[in-house]
Each structure stands twice: as structure tokens, then as C-alpha cells.
Amino acid sequence: MTQTFDLILRHGLAVTPNGTERTDIGVSDGRIKAIGDLRAASAAEEMDLRGLAVLPGVIDTQVHFREPGLEYKEDLATGTAAAAQGGVVAVFEMPNTKPSATTADAIDDKLARAKGRAWVDHAFFLGAAADNIDHLALWERRPGCAGIKVFMGSSTGNLLVPDDETLAEVLAQGVRRIAVHCEDEGRLAERKHLADAGAHPRVHHEWRDVETALKASQRLIALAEKARRRVHVLHVTTAEEMEFLADHKAVATVETTPQHLTLAAPECYERLGSYAQMNPPIRGVHHRDALWRAIANGVVDVLGSDHAPHTREEKDRPYPQSPSGMTGVQTLVPVMLDHVSQGRLTLERLVDLTSAGPARIFGITGKGRTAVGYDADFTIVDLKAERIITNDWIASRCGWTPFDGKRVTGWPTATIVRGRVVMRDGQLLGAPSGLPVRFQECPA
């Protein structure tokens, strides 16, 4: 009897648990059903991927899509469209919206907003605040909740957790890994004079200096070890933090971003001004080199884009009135493929950082690897394609990228989410059908 599938991906160079191999992949009911020689099989839809690589679907575990409350610069529809255009199959969205996502109702509201509008699968972080600590253990386990997010440095609304006493209370609640923005609020306040009105964005990394980041990371790890709670340190930017965190992997996983691996001060501030401004800041070449060593040494567990769009009008304000943040979800894959092309990391290591790593850290069910029984999520890429990233390509509502004009080798050509082709050759296909991400603690 001829084996039949809903979709067969043929002749692609697939990154699987067995290594990188040219093979066929059969998909039915949104799941991977077979990997191997499927010449004798048929399907309702087939894709000939000769000359292309088939990666497990890329998962971006740090995006800010601004809905509700800030839809004028991004929303769940435009943000997930940008993700799909960039080859990303799933996103974890952060809680600093208006109102902040600090309640179960807020998570449910975001899930309702995403239904029928999100192009990719999604989950939402619950923000820790002084007034919701007693509920975190229960609410973190809700379906569609990515876990708890803590801001140790300045944020919006009531999300700031600046002191050790409150942070220790947060760490004592629940069991899932907590994602943390590590900047020391006290030191930021002490050094704010460096960024007084009239300053140039080049001082941003001097105001929010190495000690600001390292001190917060050290405080976090001391409390996490005492609480025996796993933490995920977001967007690590300094050589000193990487050296410190390498000795504390029993409790801490580590994220860095494509922009911190690619841009460097002071050049980026001279060229881009406030469009290079983000928190924690882009630092000098010494720190960028240390991030690459940490990737090579296995200290870094995951890449996140920290996609945080603002309008041009906002970014054009005089520093420091200009807000921190930049787009990134759509450029994560091409920027990192270019680094693969340049020999800075292997394709397999990129897959570990963007697919297997997120699944492992956050306990995602059914995603993160190309294996039978897993969701049929794929990021199809042309490793040899030469393109120029432009603002015109950016689907985010803000319409700009700090990588405008950057020539890259490597490009996403298709995004497949649970067996459904949502982007091919730069075109979104069909209608948005993203679903909540499933977690081991939160079965569907």
C-alpha cells in the first residue's frame, strides 16, 4: 500500500537528531510522521527543496509585540507576520504592555487577541510585580503562559522588582524557569547623570555599564541558588557576566541576541544614533568577542531577538528621551545565517540556539527538533542566497531595522507551522492560524 501524507518535503538538507542529512520528511495532521526515503509515498502537497536546508522551526523566546495599549507601533498581527517572514515559527511575548500582563486575566486576554490574528504559534510571559507574588505559582502553569518574567532594572508600569527581598519572594513561588532582565536599578539611578539631556546615544553603554549588568546577575544567582530555582538570564552583553555565569550553570541558562553579536560600540552609535539604543546596551568589540567565545564554549543556551519596536518619531527624539529597543524577530534568521556563512558557528549550533535550546529550557512540548511525533515546524533556508536587508522588507508596523543595508549570505525562503506553509518566497499564505505553545507543565 502506498504511504500517503498531507505534505512531503523532498530532497532538503535537514538538520535532524542524527545530524545533517539529505532526506524526505512526511507530515500528516500537523505532525512529523516519517523521515527518510519517501520516493514511493504520495501527498496532497509536495515541496521540492533541492538546494535548500530544512531547520527545525526557529523559536524566538523574547519579543515585545506591544498589544494591548501600544498598538500604534506593533500588534500581535504585525509582529507575528514579521516572525513568519523571518522564518520564525513560534514566539514568547513579554509582559510590558499597557496594562502590564501581571494577572491571569491579562494572559487570557492576550491569548484571545491572538486567536485568528497570529501567523505563528505563541505564548505570553507573566510579569512579576510586588502585588502578584502570591499568585505566581498558580498562574505560571496556565496554558499559553511562557513562565515568569522579572525586570530588575527600569521598566514600564508596575513590573520593576529592584530589591532582593521582593526578588527572593518571586523566586520562592512556583517551579518553572524564570526569565530575568539583569540591570541593577540602584546603579542605574546613581549614573543617570551621564545620560542627561543633550548627551549623545554613544554614552548609553557608559551609563548602563558593565557593573550595572554584572551586579544584577550576581545578586540574581545568589538568590536563585538559595531558593534552588532555575533562572534564565536574558540578553547577556558583557565578558564579565559570561565568565561569571559559566560557573553557575546549575541554576542559570543564558541568552544573547543577534544584535549584540553583530553590532559594536562606538561605531553603531555614530552610524545609527538612537536606532542602536537598547537595554542592556550594545557594547564594544571586546564584549562582542566574549559573547562569541561563550557561544563556542557552550555557555550560551539560546538566542532571542528582544524585538522591541518603536516608531521613527519616538526614536528620533533627543537622547535620552528616545526609547530603548529595536526590531529583531524578522532579522534573527538571516543575520545569524550570515554568521554561519562567515564560519563563526555551525548550522547545527544555530539550530541548538534557536530550536532545541528554547524547547529544552522552557519545557516546550512537541517543538524544537525534526523528529517523528513532533510538530511539523520548519524554517526552510537558502544557505547560499545573497540578499540585502532593507527597511522595506520589514513587516513590523514601525518599518525599520538597525540592519538596513546589511548584505547577508543565507535567507529564509519558507516558514511551516504545524505542517502549514505560512510563508513562501516572501509571501504570507492563507490566513493567520497560530496556536498557543504547549508546555510540559501545561498539557493542552
Image: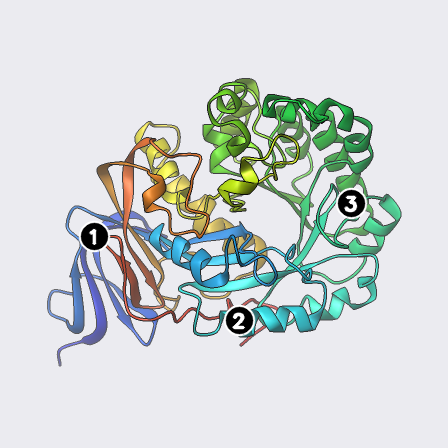
Instruction: Tell me where residue 30 appears, x and y as whole percent.
Output: 34, 72
SS for callout 1: strand
| Residue 280, placed above or below residue 311 | above
Q: Nearer the viewer, residue 364 or 431?
A: 431
Label 3 neighbour load within 10 Å: few <14, some 14-19, many 20+:
some
Which label's residue is closer to the chain start, 1 or 3?
Answer: 1
Quadrant (top left/top right/bottom left/bottom right) for the N terminus: bottom left
Residue at point 59% right, 63% down? 68
Q: Amino acid at mark 2?
A: Arg
Which label's residue is closer to the chain start, 3 or 2?
Answer: 2
Which label's residue is closer to the chain start, 1 or 2?
Answer: 1
Marks 1/3: CA distance? 44 Å
Single out the residue that lies furthest toward the bottom. 1
The residue identified by callout 3 is 225
Instruction: Tell me where residue 370 appears, x and y as whole percent.
Output: 35, 58
Residue at point 43% right, 74% down? 116
Single out the residue that lies furthest toward the left. 40
The residue identified by callout 2 is 113
Residue at point 60% right, 55% down? 94
The residue identified by callout 1 is 12
Marks 1/2: CA distance? 36 Å
Which quadrant holds residue 177?
bottom right
Q: Nearer the viewer, residue 201 or 281?
A: 201
> Marks 3 and 2: which is nearer the front?
2
SS for callout 3: helix
SS for callout 2: helix
